[in-house]
Amino acid sequence: MTTLENINAPMRVVLLGSDTELGRAIRQYYDNDYDFDWLEVPCHEVLAKVSSSVLDQQYCDAIIDAYSLRSALQNDYDQYLELLGTLVLRDTCPLFYMLSGVQVFLGEKESSYLETDEPDARSRFARRLVEAEQKVLSSERHIVLRTGWLFSGAQDDFIANTINLVRAGSPIEFHDTAIGCPTPVSDVARVLLSVVKQRHYGALNSGVYHYCCSEEISWMGLVEAVLTTAGQFDPKAQSALELIGDTANALEMATEIKRQSLSCRKIFGHYGIKQRSWRPVLRALIRDMYNIPSN
């Protein structure tokens, strides 16, 4: 653990869920930053590690939970919740940072959700996330960071799935009327690790924070943004964009629109963190998918 006597020593951080999209983004963002010394815990080792003595102030300075957003629906997540409740209440527990999401809200509010709004979503996934949040917040020292619609361009990610459908010539049909803020995992990594650093060097603010990228967009609008960008490299994407026009017009007429966006004023006021646009990252990811070199 870093102390006053060795203030220049790397910060020792335990990363739960290091093999998730968020976990990899967090590690990659600070891959060459010697301020951090990482203990990476992949998902299949999380339960064993959370119940071990390694998660103690004597051994590490901070714990990041990138595990819950990926694993909250797993059968063994209830066991994780029990262990988490015990861990965060220990006097020797390091500062704990849980990554949660806008999914804890039902989406019926007409404006962006504030940190003071009560979670009201009823899905099993949302209920489990809320339970984990409550356990983390049972100690006033820790932080829950809720995020927007996450994308990474990897594996079964929404962006990758859309591009794969284009390449396969398969129809692209989306019927979700939600409005939200797409947020790349790399931006979440930037924000989270800024908070971790500031807390390590004396910042005292804790509790719930929201972060998502700027610019709300509908789910269908996001599909169109993906296809418009991909259309620069793939004629199939342009054709797919033309075919979803009728669906887009129908969704625009829908009345039951869910708003899944977050207000980010608090994190700016407490930590000076500004929102960024998601569009440049989206363009870069799609260029990479088509192996187009950047200029």
Image: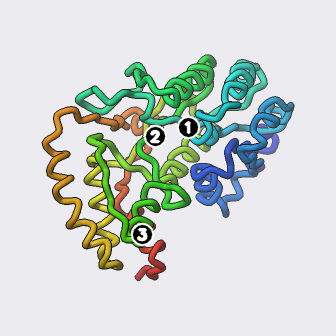
Left or right: 114, with 41 as reference point? left
Tag of residue 99: 1
Q: Earlier in the sequence, mark 1 or mark 2?
A: 1
Tag of residue 286: 3
Q: Does dot 3 land on a helix, a strand or a loop?
A: helix
Please say whether residue 2 is visible from this viewpoint. Answer: no
Q: Does dot 1 land on a helix, a strand or a loop?
A: strand
Q: Earlier in the sequence, mark 3 or mark 2?
A: 2
Res. 57 image quadrant: top right
Which is more toward the observer, 10 or 63?
63
Q: Amino acid at mark 2?
A: Thr
Identify the residue shown where x is 32% and y is 69%.
229
Q: Position of residue 150 (x, y in %)?
A: 46, 48
Q: Position of residue 103 (x, y in %)?
A: 43, 34
Residue indicated by mark 2? 147
> Up-down: is 239 above or below 130?
below
Q: Position of residue 200 (x, y in %)?
A: 65, 38
Q: Does dot 2 land on a helix, a strand or a loop?
A: strand
Rounded to the nearest whole Å, what is the CA distance between mark 1 and mark 2? 7 Å
Q: Are marks 1 and 2 in contact (CB under 8 Å)?
A: yes
> Up-down: is 96 above or below 30?
above
Count neighbours of disc 1 (C-alpha within 10 A) and say few if under 14, some if 14 to 19, many if 20 or more: many
Q: Amino acid at mark 1?
A: Leu
Q: Earlier in the sequence, mark 3 or mark 1?
A: 1
Rounded to the nearest whole Å, what is the CA distance between mark 3 and mark 2? 22 Å
